[in-house]
């Protein structure tokens, strides 16, 4: 049969273990919150960078389209001018 002092010691040890477990759980939850915030911040930063990259790409596409359009217009003018010259030579 267990003595009262043994039961009290076991009870005190259990309470200390429970207290340490609760402290460890609290620390783990705090670390989890910090990591979760870091992850959210990194995700927001990635989305921001992606948006900026998309805007840059859109700008480059627009510039390329404008350049292509101007080039086609110049080619058309040269073609028309050449056609007019050939018509005059006939």
Image (cartoon, rainbow, N blue to C red):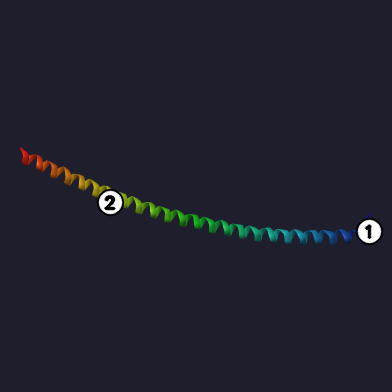
| 89 left or right, relative to 15 | left
The residue indicated by pointer 2 is: 66
Q: Position of residue 73 (x, y in %)?
A: 21, 48
Residue 29: mark in rendering? none
Q: Quadrant of the C terminus?
A: top left
| Residue that lies at the very extreme toward the top in this rendered image | 90
| Residue that lies at the very extreme toward the front in this rendered image | 89
For the residues labelled 1 and 2, the Cα–Cα distance comes to: 93 Å
Q: Position of residue 76 (x, y in %)?
A: 18, 45
Label 1 or label 2, whichever comes before in sequence order:
1
| 66 left or right, relative to 50 | left
Residue at position x 81%, y 61% in the image:
16
Q: Quadrant of the N terminus?
A: bottom right
Residue at position x 54%, y 59% in the image:
41
Which of the pair 29/75 is nearer the observer?
75
Which of the pair 64/20 is nearer the observer?
64
Tag 2 secondary structure? helix
The residue indicated by pointer 1 is: 3
Q: Residues within 10 Å of mark 2 (few under 14, many from 20)?
A: few
| 76 left or right, relative to 58 | left
Is 89 situated above or below 52?
Answer: above
Which of the pair 13/53 is nearer the observer?
53
């Amino acid at each position: 049969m267990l003595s009262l002092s043994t039961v009290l010691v076991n009870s005190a040890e259990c309470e200390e273990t429970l207290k340490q477990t609760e402290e460890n759980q609290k620390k783990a939850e705090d670390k989890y919150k910090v990591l979760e915030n870091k992850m959210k911040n990194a995700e927001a930063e990635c989305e921001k960078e992606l948006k900026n990259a998309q805007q840059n790409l859109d700008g480059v596409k627009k510039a390329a389209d404008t350049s292509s359009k101007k080039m086609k217009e110049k080619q058309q003018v040269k073609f028309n001018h050449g056609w007019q010259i050939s018509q005059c030579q006939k």
